[in-house]
Image: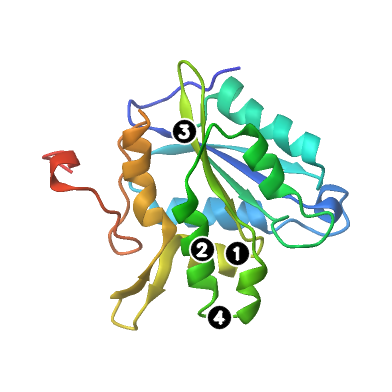
């Protein structure tokens, strides 16, 4: 069922945590709460979320992404988990399978940020893609599984003064959503400075 916007500029976000053990109740999932908390802190624009906790199964991941974009009508879908080289890590494969176009810059920047902390960032296979139908389009991004890494990836790296040294990937998300026909998304500048060309900025924003 299509989600209804309470406001014209309300962002509809799908959030998918992918973990065999968390989905079986072996441990408490941290990915979905981490994403929810970050969005609540960073977004000035109203938003609603649709959350899914599923196993590392490619068919299940594909069906979930298709449901969130095609049926729910999400503008943005964020996944956490399942992006490493282990045999059960199939999130990138599932994401690519439902994509209509690739957005390779997102994966490149995520690894750029993570390499500031750990050399094993090169093992990450995170991707960013678009899924488009005749009436709707959404941006799908694979994120890390841990809340700290999620924040670093989305928000980027800063000096103690607050000045950005490495841009987080969410800096480019609002303009990307503009370009694919989604709502006009704004962020709290104290958390994350999103970027738009001057020609794309609203006068009162």
Estimate how packed mark 3 is, as few (under 14), some (14 to 19) or many (20 or more) residues with alpha carbons within 10 Å. many
Mark 3 and mark 4 lie on one chain; the one further toward the N terminus is 3
Visible residue check, residue 45: no
**x and y percentages locating residue 159 in the rendered image:** 34, 81
Image x and y of residue 35, in percent: 56, 53
Q: Residue at x 77, y 55 (%)?
A: 89
Q: Identify the image quadrant of residue 170.
A: bottom left
Q: Looking at the picture, does residue 39 appear above or below residue 45?
A: below
Q: Residue 147 shows which numbered tag?
A: 1
Q: Are marks 1 and 3 in contact (CB under 8 Å)?
A: no
Element under disc 3: loop
Is residue 29 shown left or right of residue 198? right
SS for callout 1: helix
What residue do we see at 78% from left, 40% from top? 58
Residue at position x 54%, y 76% in the image: 115
Say which of marks 4 and 1 sits in front.
4
Residue topped by disc 4: 117
Question: Which residue ends up furthest to the bottom in the rendered image?
Answer: 160
């Amino acid at each position: 069922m299509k989600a209804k916007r309470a406001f014209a500029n309300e962002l509809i976000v799908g959030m998918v945590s992918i973990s065999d053990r968390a989905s079986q109740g072996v441990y408490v999932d941290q990915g979905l709460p981490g994403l929810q908390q970050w969005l609540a802190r960073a977004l000035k624009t109203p938003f609603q979320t649709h959350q899914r906790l599923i196993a590392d199964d490619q068919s299940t991941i594909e069906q979930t992404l298709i449901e969130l974009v095609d049926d729910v009508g999400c503008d943005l879908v964020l996944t956490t988990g399942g992006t490493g080289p282990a045999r059960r890590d199939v999130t990138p494969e599932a994401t690519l399978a439902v994509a209509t176009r690739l957005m390779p810059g997102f994966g490149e920047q995520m690894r750029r940020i993570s390499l500031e902390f750990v050399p094993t960032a090169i093992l990450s296979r995170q991707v960013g893609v678009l899924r488009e139908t005749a009436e709707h389009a959404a941006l799908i991004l694979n994120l890390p599984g841990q809340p700290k890494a999620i924040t670093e990836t989305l928000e980027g790296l800063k000096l103690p003064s607050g000045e950005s040294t490495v841009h987080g990937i969410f800096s480019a998300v609002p303009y990307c959503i503009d370009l694919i026909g989604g709502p006009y998304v704004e962020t709290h500048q104290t958390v994350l400075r999103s970027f738009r060309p001057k020609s794309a900025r609203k006068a009162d924003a």
